[in-house]
Image: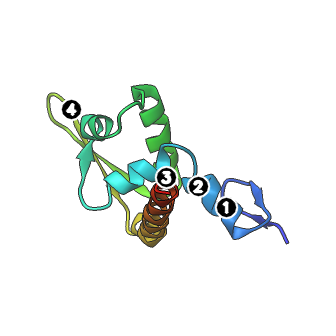
C-alpha cells in the first residue's frame, strides 16, 4: 500500500521513506556530526572530508526542509549561521546508532576473514 508524504512523493514502504529522507552518502554523516552539538557550516565541512560546499549546502537544505535540521542565523557582521538537530531530527539518532553498531560488527567480521 503506497503512502503519500508532504512532498507529494509516493512510498511503498517505510524503509523507502527513511532512505529517501536520510539516505545517501552525506545526510547520515551530517546528522551524525550534529548529534551532540551545534555546528557552523565550516565546522561541518571540516569534519566531513570530501564534501564540496555546494553539496553540503544542498544536503543541509534538504534536511532542513524535511524538518530534521534547524538553521539559525545571527544578525552579526560577518554573518554567523549554526546548524543543529530539531527535536524531530533527534528521533533519527537511534537509527544512526544502529547503523554505527552494525557497521562496527561488519568491520569486525571483515577483519576476521583476513585472519586465516
Measured along the vertical axis of the image, is residue 90 above or below residue 24?
A: below
Residue at label 4? 79
| Dot 4: element | loop
Residue name at image x 47 percent, y 31 percent: 55
Residue 26 in picture, x, y percent from top left: 48, 43
Q: Earlier in the sequence, mark 2 or mark 3?
A: 2
Q: Nearer the viewer, mark 3 or mark 4?
A: 3
Residue at label 1? 17
Colour setting: rainbow
Residue name at image x 47 percent, y 70 percent: 98
The answer to whether marks 1 and 2 mark residues whose Cβ atoms lie closer than 8 Å is yes
The answer to which quarter of the image holds residue 77 is top left
| Dot 3: element | loop
Residue at label 3? 114
Is 94 in front, or is 6? 94
Is 40 in front, or is 70? 40
Q: CA distance from mark 3 to mark 4?
A: 51 Å
Residue name at image x 29 percent, y 40 percent: 47
Q: Residues within 10 Å of mark 4 (few under 14, many from 20)?
A: few
Q: Nearer the viewer, mark 4 or mark 2?
A: 2
Residue 49 in picture, x, y percent from top left: 35, 34
Count of picture labels:
4
Amino acid at each position: 500500500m503506497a503512502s503519500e508524504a508532504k512532498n507529494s512523493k509516493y512510498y511503498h514502504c517505510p524503509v523507502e521513506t527513511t532512505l529517501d529522507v536520510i539516505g545517501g552518502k552525506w545526510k547520515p554523516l551530517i546528522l551524525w556530526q550534529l548529534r551532540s552539538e551545534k555546528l557552523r557550516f565550516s565546522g561541518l565541512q571540516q569534519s566531513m572530508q570530501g564534501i564540496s560546499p555546494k553539496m553540503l549546502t544542498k544536503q543541509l537544505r534538504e534536511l532542513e526542509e524535511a524538518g530534521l535540521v534547524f538553521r539559525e542565523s545571527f544578525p552579526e557582521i560577518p554573518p554567523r549561521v549554526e546548524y543543529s538537530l530539531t527535536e524531530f531530527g533527534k528521533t533519527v539518532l537511534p537509527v544512526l546508532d544502529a547503523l554505527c553498531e552494525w557497521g562496527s560488527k561488519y568491520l569486525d567480521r571483515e577483519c576476521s576473514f583476513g585472519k586465516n
